[in-house]
Image (spheres, helix red, strand yellow):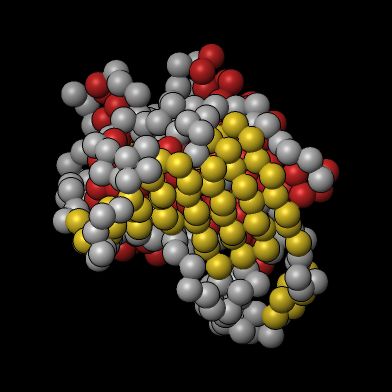
């Protein structure tokens, strides 16, 4: 079986862990053959550090004969252009979250990929880690009975105090729902299946944000998107879920994710990580029990999703961090905003299957 060759477009903040893992723990399963970035010095630095060829022009990397899969880790508003160019060039594509900023952009990419028999994959792949995979097995094996409800919460006070270039978090394709919502919603869809109805309320609390991190300390950002979103989800399985994503909260004591079943409760670890801990409290028990993790991916294993896709291409099987699920998550995220704006429920036009356990 041939090893799939990966060309990386985007050498920003998140690229380091991809490069480390794809050339390290997954280095025998895939091969990174090229990197590029609009900021040349970033790509050159990555090229030198990881001993990977640097290609100056994005279009040359995408169209080149040395790549099979394009890893698209550009900023959200560039996801569509890069993904579409990759598919047009006959390449499989795996993007960072979200799939695209707009539903119609994502549809175009997925439709063309299907016509050309190409794979579309998408982050997050944290649901493939030992933490959430352990939770998946606990649910599937009936440890908490039949799931009846769920809750999820991601709340902080934004990224302008630590990120070197945080402006895009407050533009279209950003905000807490589109930035962090994919981790939580992908986790929930993996555990509980697709969503059939949503409602939501969304607000923008501050019109501007001031960067306090370097090198842009003191720069004022205009906020263009809602920064606090509260949503309700009806799952096809009958589960009712709630979610909060916020860049307006300094501190809280809410859980990352909890699943409430007919016979107990499952406490799910941070969906932005691959590990644990995982806790269960069954209805007759007085204390929570920590459950040993299953699987080997408990540390930061970013790159696992694209590696699984690369192997799935060779094996002729579905890959797990797939475009169908990513589009459903995108549809649901927009649905919260749509429901807030309209004052009505939104019924997602999309659906997906739960990916197979790892």
Residue ID at (81%, 45%) = 343
Q: Position of residue 314 (x, y in %)?
A: 26, 23
- Considering every residue shown, the one lying at the far front of the view is 284
* 311 to the left or right of 124: left
Relative to 129, residue 146 above or below: above
Task: Report the front residue among 153 and 181.
Answer: 153
Q: Is residue 97 visible?
A: no
Number of labels in the image equals 0
Task: Report the front residue among 84 and 173.
Answer: 173
- Considering every residue shown, the one lying at the far right of the view is 342
Q: Quadrant of the N terminus?
A: top left
Q: Position of residue 64 (x, y in %)?
A: 44, 33
Residue ID at (29%, 27%) = 312
Residue ID at (73%, 38%) = 345
Q: Position of residue 164 (x, y in %)?
A: 55, 73
Q: Quadrant of the C terminus?
A: top left
Task: Report the front residue among 71 and 52.
Answer: 71
* 217 to the left or right of 120: right
Relative to 186, residue 257 above or below: below
Task: Report the front residue among 279 and 43.
Answer: 279
Quarter of the image where one finds residue 158: bottom right
Relative to 235, residue 15 above or below: below
Q: Is residue 243 visible?
A: yes
Quarter of the image where one finds residue 209: bottom right
* 304 to the left or right of 258: left
Residue ID at (21%, 38%) = 29
Q: Position of residue 21 (x, y in %)?
A: 27, 53
């Amino acid at each position: 079986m041939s090893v799939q060759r990966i060309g990386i477009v985007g050498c920003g903040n998140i690229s380091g862990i991809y490069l480390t893992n794809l050339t390290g723990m997954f280095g025998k399963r895939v091969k990174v053959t090229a990197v590029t970035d609009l900021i040349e010095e970033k790509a050159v630095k990555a090229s030198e550090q990881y001993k990977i060829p640097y290609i100056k022009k994005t279009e040359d990397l995408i169209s080149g004969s040395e790549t099979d899969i394009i890893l698209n880790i550009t900023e959200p508003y560039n996801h569509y252009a890069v993904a579409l160019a990759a598919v047009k060039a006959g390449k499989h594509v795996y993007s960072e979250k979200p799939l695209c900023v707009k539903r119609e952009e994502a549809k175009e990419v997925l439709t063309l990929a299907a016509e050309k028999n190409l794979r579309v994959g998408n982050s997050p792949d944290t649901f493939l880690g030992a933490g959430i995979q352990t939770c998946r097995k606990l649910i599937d094996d009936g440890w908490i009975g039949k799931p009846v409800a769920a809750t999820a919460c991601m709340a902080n006070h934004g990224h302008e105090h630590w990120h070197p270039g945080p402006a895009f978090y407050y533009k279209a394709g950003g905000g807490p729902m589109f930035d962090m919502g994919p981790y939580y919603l992908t986790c929930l869809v993996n555990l509980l299946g697709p969503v059939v109805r949503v409602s939501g309320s969304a607000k923008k609390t501050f019109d501007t944000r001031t960067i306090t991190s370097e090198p842009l300390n003191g720069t004022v950002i205009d906020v263009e998107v809602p920064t606090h979103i509260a949503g309700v989800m009806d799952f096809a399985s009958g589960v009712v879920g709630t979610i909060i994503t916020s860049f307006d909260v300094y501190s809280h004591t809410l859980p990352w994710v909890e699943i409430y079943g007919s016979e107990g409760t499952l406490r799910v670890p941070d969906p932005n990580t691959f590990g644990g801990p995982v806790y269960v409290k069954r209805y007759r028990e007085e204390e929570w029990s920590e459950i040993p993790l299953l699987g080997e991916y408990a540390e930061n294993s970013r790159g696992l999703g694209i590696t699984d896709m690369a192997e799935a291409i060779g094996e002729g099987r579905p890959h797990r961090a797939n475009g169908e699920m990513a589009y459903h998550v995108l549809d649901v995220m927009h649905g919260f905003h749509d429901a807030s704006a309209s004052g009505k429920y939104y019924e997602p036009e999309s659906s997906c299957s739960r990916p197979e356990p790892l």
